[in-house]
Amino acid sequence: MNNKTLVGSTIGTTLDRFINHKQADFPFATGELSQLLRDIALAGKIINLEINKSGLLDIAGAYGAVNVQGEEQQKLDVIANVRFIRALRNGGQVCAIVSEEDDEIVEINADSNYVVAMDPLDGSSNIDVNVSIGTIFSIYRRVTAPGEHVTKEDVLQKGDKQVAAGYILYGSSTMMVYTTGHGVNGFTLEPSLGEFVLSHADIQSPEDGQIYSVNEGAYYSFEQGVQDYIRYCKEERYSARYIGSLVSDFHRNMFKGGIYLYPRTDKSPNGKLRLVYECNALAFIAEQSGGMATDGENRIMSLDPLELHQRTQLLIGSTAMVKKAVSFL
Ligand SMILES: O=P(O)(O)OC[C@H]1O[C@](O)(COP(=O)(O)O)[C@@H](O)[C@@H]1O
Ligand SMILES: [Mg+2]
Ligand SMILES: [Mg+2]
């Protein structure tokens, strides 16, 4: 882990100031993307407050509905979804949202330029047991003209088209980590100030590592190559670490060096994780911090999304480890 002092964006700089500073790098910037990043940070702060006291409030447990994935929605999944949509609507920069919790495209401000794909609450199985969870987001510029009807073309863009992406991690501290294609920076929420403050500048993921993250309980449903790679990790005496929240496992491995795998199984022939609002964002962060993200054959960000809730196999993390894993497939 390296904390470097960068001209104009020193450790301790607030997110707001950092965004302003970075915007100056783009002479034709309109400030829309900057405002959108602020809106996401605001929604993250609001959700963070609810998560922190979720045990005290009647927001634990199931919501009593099933989302398009066939998964039982948790109350906090729905609350986080509502909070994000409201913050992005009020912020005025978004024309459409693709969310894990909504079957169809959520149309917002027809005249706005940006599309957001989001997983409002990642790691839902950990919500009620006080284990770290997150929010994942990808930002694209629409391809249709402002004012026109939003189409699937606007929301089903390759990961390579992302203009920004990141996540908010609600853990022992709350962090917002994002990229606009110029490196990855992490901001820690200073609770008494209520401000995200630059704490991890220009994050670089180690080339190699000793940690592997996979749900080994599904070992026998994985393809032979994946089973062989997991056995290799054991022979190498790597450490097995699996929180069960993609954002948290990814975050740890990005700093310490490691690989996260969610392989396809006989039950889920395309894997479990969603390309549009989980994998593309983390793939952008991984590549921008020196790591790698693949479905076993292709770069995740080169994949053409065909469906809003399309799933993909995911291998992500330190480059040397991901390449090694792919060599087993
Ligand atoms: O319980 P499993 O099958 O290991 O799946 C855990 C994975 O599923 C997820 O919970 C899926 O995300 P959601 O919680 O947003 O649906 C990931 O965060 C996590 O890595
Ligand atoms: Mg998720
Ligand atoms: Mg989710």
Image: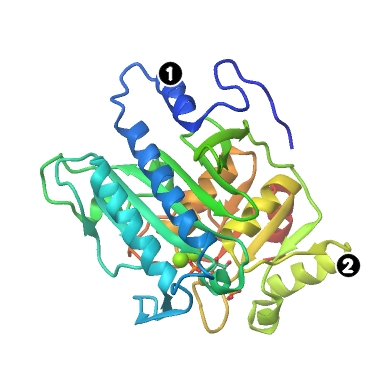
Camera sees residue 196? yes
Q: CA distance from mark 2 to mark 1?
A: 48 Å
Give the structural element (helix, strand or loop) at label 1: loop
Residue type at mark 2: give it: Glu
Front residue of this view, candidates 99 and 305: 99
In this view, 317 is above or below 132: above
Query: What quarter of the picture does the N terminus occupy?
Result: top right
Of labels 2 and 1, earlier in sequence is 1
Which numbered circle lies on residue 235?
Answer: 2
Quarter of the picture containing the C terminus is: bottom right
Q: Is residue 73 above or below residue 154?
A: below
Residue identified by numbered label 1? 25
Give the quarter of the image for residue 217.
Answer: bottom right
Residue ID at (52%, 58%): 134
Ligand 1 is in which quadrant of the figure? Answer: bottom right
Tell me if I can see residue 184 in this picture.
Answer: no
Number of residues whose C-alpha sits closer than 10 Å to that of mark 1, classed few (under 14), some (14–19) or many (20 or more): few
The structure's colour scheme is rainbow
- Where is residue 80 shown, x and y percent of the image? 40, 61
Is residue 243 or residue 198 the one in the foreground? 198
Q: Position of residue 131 (x, y in %)?
A: 63, 66
Q: Residue at x 82, y 62 (%)?
A: 239
SS assignment at label 2? helix
At which x and y percent is residue 190?
57, 40
Q: Residues within 10 Å of mark 2 (few under 14, many from 20)?
A: few
Q: Tell me residue 132's x, y (percent).
A: 61, 61
